[in-house]
Image (cartoon, helix red, strand yellow):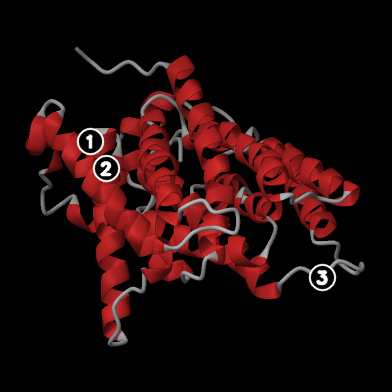
């Protein structure tokens, strides 16, 4: 029986993932404040998440066979894991450690704008004029959030890390769409985290050092054990949320997933305000609204997108030129 996308289920998956990711922003910031480096936290998260998914994958049907890969699949799986599960989270953690949670999330969620621009210039898809209005609004929103020329001084490295994270996050969406076309969410996510853990260990080993996770044995200023926060980081903020996003790409195009996932900056700011006492200025809130509105316009600017084209043959991946005469989904 052919697979039938269920958009309502996809929307629910992305909304729940956005909430889990939003909570994870504040949880991750508290863990980072304990003294662990962003790269080491990324490696710890990836290793723990991979182990949890391997256990789940063995227990649940169809069992260990779901993790089999062909030589043809391996290059994209490696790229998917390194980019989406190692570099993106590491850059996000760097941004979180240097910026308020809400601003780091707003900068990261310019990713759908890059997806729309790729559709226009990379795939030569037809777009509506509102793409350019959305692009202009996004740039204006970014300027307002960063208070360009004003009294607020955001950390330059934090801003650069968050924007680069957004660019690679867009690539993650595009690669992820192709991965879930023929693999289940547990398999895709386990491979992603496994590759990320290996990348983290190799980059540390190249410098003659092992990851330093000693700070994870401590407690927060309020007395909460860091290891308890790490459980949420792995289960709620990683395994469940990433698996939901991966599964949603079987039911929705990446542009729709990106649109709904923009709930995360809003929810993340609210969680950070409640849990960490972080708040954005009125000007930054206005900038955030302008930024998200611009991204939303850009996301809906493409013409003639058909979801069932997401299951095109592997040779038509986002890494290869489009050969279709009609617009295809990114």
Instruction: Using the image as rendered, state which of residue 226 and residue 117 is in the foreground.
Output: 226
Residue 12 in sight in this render: yes
Distance from Cα at disc 2 to Cα at disc 1:
6 Å
Give the mark toward the camera: 1 or 3. 3
Counting from the top left corner in percent of width and height, residue 115 is at 54, 47
Lower position in the chain sequence, tag 2 or tag 1: 1
Choose between 275 and 183: the one closer to the eye.
275
Residue annotated with mark 3: 153
**x and y percentages locating residue 300 in the rendered image:** 64, 32
Q: First in sequence: mark 3 or mark 2? A: 3
| Label drawn at residue 83 | none
Question: Residue furthest toward the front?
Answer: 223
Q: How far is disc 3 from disc 2 in space, using C-alphas? A: 40 Å
In the picture, the disc for residue 188 is: 2
Q: Helix or strand or loop: what does disc 1 sit on? A: loop
Q: In the rendering, at what x and y percent does residue 143 appear?
A: 82, 59
Compare marks 1 and 3 and give the one earlier in the sequence.
3
The residue where tag 1 is placed is 183
Location of residue 71 by image quarter: bottom left
- Where residue 109 sits in the image (x, y, percent)? 62, 48
């Amino acid at each position: 029986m052919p697979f039938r996308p269920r958009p309502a289920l996809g929307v629910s998956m992305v909304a729940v993932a956005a909430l889990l990711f939003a909570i994870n922003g504040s949880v991750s910031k508290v863990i980072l404040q304990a003294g662990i480096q962003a790269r080491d936290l990324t490696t710890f998260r990836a290793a723990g998440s991979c182990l949890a998914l391997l256990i789940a994958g063995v227990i649940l049907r169809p069992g260990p066979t779901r993790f089999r890969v062909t030589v043809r699949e391996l290059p994209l799986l490696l790229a998917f894991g390194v980019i989406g599960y190692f570099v993106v989270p590491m850059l996000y953690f760097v941004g979180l450690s240097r910026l308020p949670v809400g601003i780091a999330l707003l900068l990261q969620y310019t990713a759908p704008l890059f997806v729309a621009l790729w559709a226009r210039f990379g795939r030569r898809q037809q777009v509506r004029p509102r793409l350019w209005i959305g692009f202009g609004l996004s740039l204006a929103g970014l300027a307002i959030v960063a208070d360009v020329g004003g009294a607020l001084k955001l950390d330059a490295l934090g801003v650069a890390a968050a924007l680069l994270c957004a660019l690679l996050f867009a690539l993650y969406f595009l690669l992820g769409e192709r991965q879930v076309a023929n693999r289940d969410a547990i398999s895709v996510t386990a491979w992603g985290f496994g590759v990320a853990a290996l990348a983290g260990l190799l980059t540390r080993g190249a410098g003659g050092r092992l990851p330093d996770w000693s700070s994870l044995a401590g407690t927060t200023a309020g007395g909460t054990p860091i290891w308890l926060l790490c459980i949420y980081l792995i289960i709620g903020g990683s395994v469940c949320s990433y698996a939901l996003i991966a599964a949603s790409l079987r039911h929705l195009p990446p542009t729709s997933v990106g649109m709904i996932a923009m709930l995360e900056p809003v929810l993340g700011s609210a969680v950070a305000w409640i849990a960490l006492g972080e708040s954005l200025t009125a000007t930054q809130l206005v900038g955030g609204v302008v930024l998200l509105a611009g991204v939303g316009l850009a996301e809906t600017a493409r013409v003639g997108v058909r979801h069932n084209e997401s299951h095109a043959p592997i040779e038509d991946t986002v890494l290869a030129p489009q050969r279709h005469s009609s617009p295809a989904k990114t």
